[in-house]
């Protein structure tokens, strides 16, 4: 290994890593151009889709409701989450210089976990919003008042930041004095912890338990919300009423299934001894594919938002009477 990524510590015969090398997709040299074009298009579509959703919600007064306020916050968190990972990944696909500084790696881990968990917390808040809207419609305006909605979003962002700090400080409190090659396209915890010196089992298990506990807690709260929602919908006498009630939840529920489906594959799948390439490819599902699908799902499965998008972006270009 080159000594360019190593600086000497005060004690003799000990060195400390000052930068890491992201192996990423260099193990698939024949597909790097295809990967670059594909991921670039997905990233641009993700940015455009979320920006269009935010602009539509801001422009259309009928969407100035708690549900779309939370959706706007979700779009912001997705933009920041992908920005923390994908531009660097795209740069590495067209560059031979794959090193990232120690501080840069810590920053990437912090922001990716912060916005990743913010996303999960906001999905949970959106589930609670649908629960109140369907199960307690007469109290909706009281329970979901502007101050309460702002507090829920602020708490989600603060909770994501706490998770980012806990994970990042736990990992970078370790000593890195050996190899500096991360077998991933960003500073992900499992391949990074493997590079640390000494006993890493406590940190590895602790970080894993914190992440899984947080994700499962959010998921169980969403399941609980939908258990009450389904029970309430089934008591609606008319089929049309049941259909309308469930249609307000369809897009959120679909995103939850996609989000937690991919997350469970990542965090709960058994670790094979030699799964470096597989882990790299699997990482695309939650760093690029899930954010890519989210604006599509909300735009296509939410009739109110879909109509607002057409009104805001197409009515002025195709006015009636032409």
Image (tube, grey):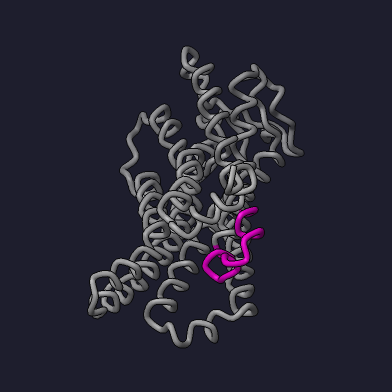
Residue farthest to the top? 30
Residues in magenta?
54-70
Q: Is residue 254 visible?
A: yes
* Predominant SS along the magenta part: helix
Residue that appears at 50% across and 57% down? 305
Percent x, y of residue 187: 58, 39
- What is the quadrant of residue 219 in the picture? bottom left
Residue that appears at 62% across and 75% down? 151
Q: Say how many tags the image has.
A: 0
Q: Of 208 and 49, which appears nearest the observer? A: 49
Q: Is residue 172 visible?
A: no
Percent x, y of residue 120: 49, 59
Residue that appears at 44% across and 53% down? 208
- What is the quadrant of residue 70 in the picture? bottom right
Q: Of 55 and 112, which appears nearest the observer? A: 55
Residue farthest to the front? 321
Q: Of 28 and 80, which appears nearest the observer? A: 80
The image shows residue 177, relative to residue 238, as above or below, that is above
Q: Is residue 57 magenta?
A: yes
Q: Is residue 36 magenta?
A: no
Percent x, y of residue 227: 29, 73
Q: Quadrant of the N terminus?
A: top right
The image shows residue 263, relative to residue 10, as above or below, that is below
Percent x, y of residue 258: 38, 49
């Amino acid at each position: 290994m080159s000594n360019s990524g190593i600086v000497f510590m005060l004690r003799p015969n000990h060195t400390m890593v000052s930068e890491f090398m992201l192996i990423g997709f260099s193990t698939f040299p024949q597909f790097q151009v295809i990967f670059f074009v594909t991921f670039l298009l997905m990233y641009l579509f993700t940015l455009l889709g979320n920006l269009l959703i935010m602009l539509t919600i801001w422009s259309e007064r009928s969407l100035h409701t708690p549900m779309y306020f939370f959706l706007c916050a979700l779009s912001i968190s997705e933009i920041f989450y992908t920005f923390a990972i994908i531009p660097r990944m795209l740069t590495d696909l067209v560059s031979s210089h794959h090193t990232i500084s120690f501080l840069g790696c810590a920053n990437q881990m912090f922001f990716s976990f912060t916005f990743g968990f913010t996303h999960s917390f906001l999905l949970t808040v959106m589930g609670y919003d649908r629960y109140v809207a369907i199960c307690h419609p007469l109290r909706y305006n009281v329970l979901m008042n502007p101050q309460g909605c702002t507090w829920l979003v602020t708490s989600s962002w603060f909770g994501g930041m706490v998770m980012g700090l806990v994970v990042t400080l736990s990992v970078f409190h370790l000593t890195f004095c050996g190899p500096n090659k991360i077998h991933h396209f960003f500073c992900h915890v499992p391949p990074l912890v493997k590079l640390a010196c000494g006993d890493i089992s406590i940190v590895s298990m602790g970080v894993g338990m914190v992440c899984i506990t947080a994700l499962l807690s959010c998921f169980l709260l969403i399941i609980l919300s939908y258990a009450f929602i389904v029970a309430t919908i089934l008591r609606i006498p008319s089929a049309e009423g049941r259909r309308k009630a469930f249609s307000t939840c369809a897009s959120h529920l679909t995103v939850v299934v996609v989000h937690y489906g991919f997350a469970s594959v990542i965090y709960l799948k058994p670790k094979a001894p030699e799964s470096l390439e597989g882990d790299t490819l699997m990482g695309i599902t939650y760093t690029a594919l899930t954010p890519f699908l989210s604006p599509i799902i909300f735009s296509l499965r939410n009739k109110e938002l879909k109509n607002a998008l057409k009104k805001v972006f197409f009515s002025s270009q195709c006015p009636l009477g032409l």
